[in-house]
Amino acid sequence: MRSVPWLCAAWVALLLGGEDAPSIRINDDTAQTIDVAGLSAKDLEALGKLGWKSEDWQALFAVFVKPAAGKERGPALLGSYRIEKGVVRFEPRFPLVRGVRYQAVLDPARVPGRAELKEKPIEKEILLAKAKTEPTVVTEVYPTADKLPENQLKFYLHFSAPMNKGDSYKHIKLLDDKGKAVDVPFLELEQELWDGTGTRLTLFCDPGRIKRGLKPREEDGPVLEEGKSYTLVIERAFEDANGNPLKEAFRKKFKALAPDDKQPDPKTWKIKAPAVGTRDPLVVTIPKSLDHALLERLVWVADGKGQKAAGKVTVNEHETVWQFTPEKAWEAGMYQLVADTRLEDLAGNSIAKPFEVDVFHPVQREVKTETVTVPFEVQPKGRR
Amino acid sequence: MLPRKSLAFVALAGVVLLAGSVRADLTESMKRGTPEIKSAGPLAFGPEGVLFVGDPQAAMLFAIDTGDRKEGGKDLPKVANVDEKIASLLGIESKQLQIVDAAVNPISGTTYLSVARGKGPDAKAVLLTVDRAGKVGEFVLKDVKFASTELPNPAKDKQRADAITHIAYVDGKVFVAGLSNEEFSSKLRSIPFPFAKAADGASVEIFHGSHGKIETASPVRTFVACDINGEANLLCAYTCTPLVRIPVKDLEPGKKIKGTTVAELGNRNRPLDMVVYSKGGKEYILMANSARGVMKIPTEGVEKIAGITERVNDKAGLKYETIESLKGVEHLGRFDKDHALIVKRIEGGNLSLETIELP
């Protein structure tokens, strides 16, 4: 029985002792830290005394992005080094990316006192498995109508999941009726016009070709021509934020009608007032399609006191029907349908002003107020 | 009454103190901390090593004291495959990297890069430095002196966002050009620096008057401050392609600003960056243009151009020459009075960071 404590002590000494070869250990499945294990307490103490900077540590132990075949390895990953819990611990500055191959390289000979052991450098590949995700699809392209004015200003592309930015224009094409791509039809901005969630992209048709009297239009003509048919194609190769292509390409066929230079006017909208005591939607029918995003954001209902009513807005029928379902049941009385004058139609004409203001022929209206209101009444019970 | 000698001393000390405090004013409004920059946006340097950083996702403008105030020597940086090197440091593949903007600190000659690590909506904004020797490192935004301000009228909506196309510091103000991802509007904002407590700054709508007849909203994709006959002007490149001149003094809130067209850049031109410089006693603009390469535009007589109002004549407006040897330039900035900094894509596909002599 006296030998048991001795055996235990020996076993513990073996575990802690420098008899183990140094090795690279990846911590948990996110590799938040990567350790060098198997160094003796003496080794760690000696290392701790050196006051090494990152560059010095990198000679001992570093992680690299595995270079493509035939290419040279780049500089080591930025990160911090510390000695704790019996290991040398490297914490990458930024989390490792799933699906990217990394190489952790350890050169034990760099540890003071280990050079004579003539240990060879150790390499370990790190590859965090990419999560399996559903392929992303285009859920909608606005405007949804298949007849658009020749001076159509923009498209909104909606995706089912966040997308990668930077190469969008390469994967969006506008084809004419012969299947030939229109040359650079969209405004290509380095900044790309994504929303905060990365699921909606705004595409502007080249304003230099829509606006009359500018050189691009003189040289290349308008983007769309009245009477012609087109197909907007969103290619499958468009990558989502996981680096995967779309499930399939998306095609929107449409025909170009005459250009539209008439400003939207809420006074021409038909308002169907809901029944009192219900939460039936207020239904507003608009003579022509308007901008989808602006319809959702720039139109609302105000009560008799001018307070914005809480509720849900939906836009239907190819962006010609605006509906508002209140949170609370309608009370009898006067309400206001309020529209911000920045609300645009498909050609960028707003309530405030047309897309192109002809300063010599001011037949167009310029509305100076910020909003335009149209009153409607929710009739009390018994009155129809 | 103090004896005269001590009075003089007090006066001198006063002047020194005053000079010191004028310099300190720029960073006085700043507090030490960790600025949370949510998205990588454009960069611009102010005086004294103050770096302005736009954050489009958060609709914020940051002013960071880089502390980089020592003159840096004479070396000119040259980094081949800079995209691979940066990607390597950040632990990503180079196709997952976006270099959003580059700006050179005129004091030290250190280049600062605004970079997105990743291309999705959660891409991390990283600020990097490239010194004159070509060494690339991270400018860690931790425990630094900084100030920030909300860009005027930010939408509280996750969908509505303003892209920031360009920023520049001119005479105590930071100019921010942007366009909305919903309504077709163009805002040029001027924000006084040091930042005031409340979100301040004039917002003007920019219009283009085509031949003085047809007026439309005109987003600005890039601009440069230019002194014309002693008056500060902004030369702005519109997304619909005209190059226009706007006197800075005209940029008052509420005013309808119509730039004077000084050149029609024509089709498929995507001006990326512009630099103003002097050579041989004359002033020029060097413009990096994605389609047409790099153009050199003399500005002589620009103030005399009353605005291109007659159509089609290519002889109207400023002339330009294309610098054939400079292709694939994605970023262009001023390095020093004789050099520009460029980040260009070479035939093999990688990016190179280097300087060129201003032509």
Image: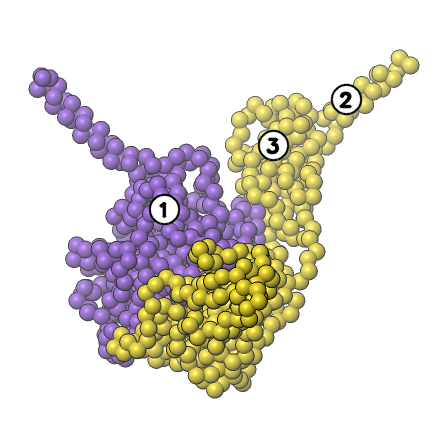
Chain colours: A yellow, B purple
Secondary-structure class at tag 3: helix
Secondary-structure class at tag 1: loop
Distance of label 2 from label 3 (alpha carbons): 24 Å
Against B350, residue A153 (above or below) is below
Instruction: Report the residue at 74% width, 25% height from top.
Output: A16
Closer to the camera in the image, A43 or B119: B119
Residue annotated with mark 2: A13
Amino acid under disc 3: Arg
Residue annotated with mark 1: B199
Residue annotated with mark 3: A110
Amino acid under disc 1: Ala
Distance of label 1 from label 2 (alpha carbons): 65 Å
Instruction: Report the residue at 61% width, 28% height from top.
Output: A83
Q: Quick check: B303 left or right of B30? A: left
Q: Please give the label number shown on residue B273.
A: none
The mark tally for this picture is 3
Q: Is residue B119 visible?
A: no
Q: Picture coordinates of residue A280 (x, y %)? A: 59, 64
Q: Picture coordinates of residue A175 (x, y %)? A: 52, 79
- Taking the view exactly as shown, the residue that stands out farthest to the top is A2
- Taking the view exactly as shown, the residue that stands out farthest to the bottom is A227
Q: Residues within 10 Å of mark 3 (few under 14, many from 20)?
A: some
Q: Picture coordinates of residue A105 (x, y %)? A: 63, 41
Against A64, residue B233 (above or below) is below
Subunit of label 3:
A
Amino acid under disc 2: Ala
Q: Quadrant of the C terminus of chain B?
A: bottom left
Location of residue A210 by image quarter: bottom left
Location of residue A372 by image quarter: bottom left
Q: Nearer the viewer, mark 1 or mark 2?
A: 1
